[in-house]
Image (spheres, helix red, strand yellow):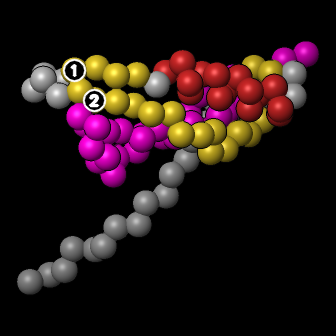
Amino acid sequence: MHIPYIANLIFSISCDGIFTEQYEEQLRLVFASNTDDAIRQATEIGSNHAEQFVDRNGRMITWNFIAVKEINQTELEAGALIYSSIKEVEPIGII
């Protein structure tokens, strides 16, 4: 039986070999028989999606796969929570 998992993958981004302090987080769906298999599949997906390309300014951009940050079993049904984020912002002061 294959169980659905949500995998959180982390990539670093560099430009012409210079570390940019930029990261990308991706949430990927994997189906696996257990957590260890889900981690293995997520790691393989991350490794396969690391890439290099030349941007419109002629610079070499590199996405480096860093790690599977988190993996969670999920329910795959209508209305299931896939992702939630709470952001705190400073209120605008009245002048």
Task: Point out residue 86 in the picture as x, y percentages from the top left corner.
Answer: 49, 58
- CA neighbours of label 1 inside 10 A, class few (<14), some (14 to 19), many (20+): few
Magenta span: 1-30
Task: Point out which mark residue 61 bears.
Answer: 2
The residue tagged 1 is 54
Task: Point out residue 61 in the picture as x, y percentages from the top left corner.
Answer: 28, 29
Residue 7: say if magenta: yes
Amino acid on which the number 2 mark rests in the picture: Ile
Amino acid on which the number 1 mark rests in the picture: Val
Decide if residue 18 is in sight here: yes
Image quarter of the C terminus: bottom left
Kindly indicate the quadrant of the structure image that contains residue 33: top right
| Residue for point 84% across, 17% down | 2
| Residue for point 12% across, 23% down | 58
Disc 2 + disc 1, Cβ < 8 Å: yes
Decide if residue 26 is in sight here: no
